Image (cartoon, helix red, strand yellow):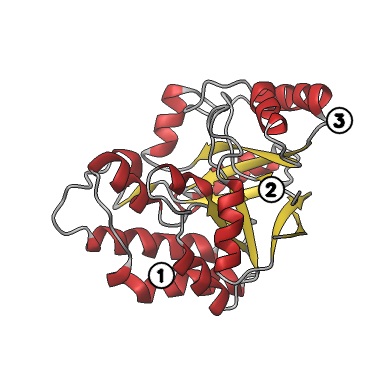
Amino acid sequence: MSYRSDFHCHSDISPDSRTDLVDLARAAADKGLSELCVTEHWECGHPCADWQERKKPFDIPRYLERFEAARSALGHRIDLRLGLELGNYTQDPAHAHRGMDALPLDFVISSLHTISGEDAYFFDYTQEDMNPHLRAYLEECLELARQQDYDSFGHLALPLRYAMIHAKRRLSFDACQDILDDVLREIARNEKALEANTSGYRSLGEPVPSVPVLRRFRELGGKLVTIGSDGHNEEHVGSYVEETMAALREAGFTRYVTYEQRRPVWRPL
């Protein structure tokens, strides 16, 4: 069996999950994963940091305690890594580094959770002309890609997934290919990874970003790719990993990476 991993998931340390970290790890082990990296939300800037502080402030001691509990209970079945998903780094770099400095991290995802200054989850995707907003999203992604201290760029094309979930509308970056190329080129140039997020299969029938974007990343010099479910519960953790591995092969990749102590480890596809 191929080496399967999930390097993007959330337990109830994050505001949008109710699943204990031990249960999350057990579900991943039961699904036959070899490795799991938990990547709790650490949001920066308005409005996402406000949302996190209001709903569930980040509890660093509890994160470490539950992680060690999971490792003690399940470390013989699955390799566990400690990670962080930095949301909107450029909106408050000082806050981002407070989180990174407080934890012995194996892996850091850089993600953008806003679009045109609004929380991307609650954005109005029914607007007739979405292209200016998609371009604004990608322009901010380019700012994120230019900051150095991350390992993988998370769920690029998140608004396309949310548009389908909330408005049953299939959008594309076709009108923004120039800036999308700039983002992909910057990630590749800095020798960072691009995440193939499996959650797109639950709404779009494909990973986020899609195979053409993953292929374009490779054409522009990208070598490192990670796989993450963005699972927030036992059902979704580790889901669609095999399908995403096949999508990466279709895009021309033969290997992907996991991370340990912020260093990439090559895995065969």
Q: Nearer the viewer, residue 98 or 75?
A: 75
Q: Secondary structure at mark 2?
A: strand
Q: Residue at x 48, y 44 (%)?
A: 199
**Residue that badge 1 annotates:** 180
Q: Secondary structure at mark 1?
A: helix
The answer to which quarter of the image holds residue 12 is: top right
Residue type (three-letter) at the residue carrying disc 1: Leu
Spatial separation of the CA atoms under disc 3 and disc 2: 21 Å
Spatial separation of the CA atoms under disc 1 and disc 3: 42 Å
Vertically, is 55 above or below 113? Answer: above
Residue type (three-letter) at the residue carrying disc 3: His
**Residue that badge 3 annotates:** 76
Residue type (three-letter) at the residue carrying disc 2: Phe
- Whether tag 1 and tag 2 are in contact, CB under 8 A, the answer is no
Q: Residue at x 79, y 26 (%)?
A: 74
Q: Residue at x 40, y 32 (%)?
A: 50
| Residue 104 falls left or right of residue 148 | right
Q: Residue 26: x, y in percent? A: 70, 26
